[in-house]
Image (tube, rainbow, N blue to C red):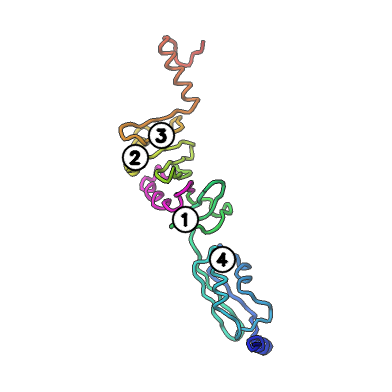
């Protein structure tokens, strides 16, 4: 029952102890984490080393998609990693996680390195986010302004723009609504105005909500017009 231990001890002392581990392909995965998963103790013999078990341990690391572990005699181990690719940041509740294009969670969001990725928010946003982000990308002038893609009740989407404007898209045919929004912005600079929200959920109308300041100014202008006073004159 001790044959494997005896072989490892003899071969390690005969010059087959693993002296070099080369790790490649890792950008997100720490080399320290890989070496810990390999599990060397300084006397580990290359002959008795279980490469398959090491491969299983490394494959369990969050970013690792595929891994190969190869013995190179007399004393070298080569670990080659293919990592998963982050597509977006998913916010669910107060948690932020990095996800793949298919919605699979990779790891918690760690900060600046991935801050430029799209932000998708809400239940169902992880699974449906890639298709919707691609739909919005067909309108570059709109896509360039998007701060977050918000899934509402797992049925439809809102866009939160960098300016703070919220665009409420309909459950059906968001492509047509986006085309209309792009045309309105191009023709009348809609998204450059003092507005809080653009509601496109109704098929026969578009509803625009002004910011409180703009709403107050509009009310004053209407009141002044009714009284025959110049707009902006207070009484």
Q: Residue at x 37, y 48 (%)?
A: 135
Work out whether mark 2 precedes mark 1 in sequence or the reverse, and give the earlier one: 1
Work out whether mark 3 precedes mark 2 in sequence or the reverse, and give the earlier one: 2
Mark 3, residue position: 198
Mark 4, residue position: 61
Q: Position of residue 34 (x, y in %)?
A: 60, 69
Kindly report which numbered mark, 4 or 3, lies closer to the viewer in this rendering: 4
Work out whether mark 4 precedes mark 3 in sequence or the reverse, and give the earlier one: 4
Look at the picture and state if 28 lies above or below 187: below
Query: Mark 3: which secondary structure?
Result: strand
Quick one: label 3, few (<14), some, or many (20+) residues within 10 Å?
Answer: many
Query: Mark 2: which secondary structure?
Result: helix
Give the CA separation, mark 4 to mark 3.
Answer: 43 Å
- Tag on residue 87? 1
Kindly report which numbered mark, 4 or 1, lies closer to the viewer in this rendering: 4
Mark 2, residue position: 177
Q: Position of residue 164 (x, y in %)?
A: 49, 36
Region in magenta:
119-144
């Amino acid at each position: 029952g001790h044959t494997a231990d005896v072989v490892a001890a003899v071969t390690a002392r005969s010059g087959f102890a693993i002296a070099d581990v080369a790790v490649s392909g890792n950008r997100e995965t720490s080399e320290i984490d890989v070496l810990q998963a390999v599990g060397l103790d300084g006397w580990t013999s290359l002959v008795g080393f279980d490469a398959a078990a090491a491969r299983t341990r490394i494959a369990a690391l969050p970013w690792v998609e595929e891994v190969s572990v190869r013995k190179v005699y007399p004393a070298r181990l080569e670990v080659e990693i293919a990592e998963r690719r982050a597509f977006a940041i998913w916010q669910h509740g107060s948690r932020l996680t990095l996800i793949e294009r298919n919605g699979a969670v990779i790891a918690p969001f760690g900060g600046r390195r991935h801050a430029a990725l799209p932000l998708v928010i809400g239940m169902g946003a992880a699974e449906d986010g890639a298709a919707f982000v691609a739909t919005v990308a067909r309108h570059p002038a709109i896509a360039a302004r998007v701060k977050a893609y918000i899934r509402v009740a797992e049925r439809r989407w809102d866009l939160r723009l960098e300016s703070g404007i919220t665009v409420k898209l309909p459950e059906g045919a968001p492509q047509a609504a986006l085309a209309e929004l792009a045309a309105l912005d191009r023709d009348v600079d809609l998204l450059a105005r003092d507005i809080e929200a653009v509601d496109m959920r109704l098929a026969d109308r578009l509803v625009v909500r002004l910011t409180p300041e703009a709403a107050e100014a509009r009310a004053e202008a209407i009141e002044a017009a009714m009284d025959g006073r110049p707009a902006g004159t207070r009484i």
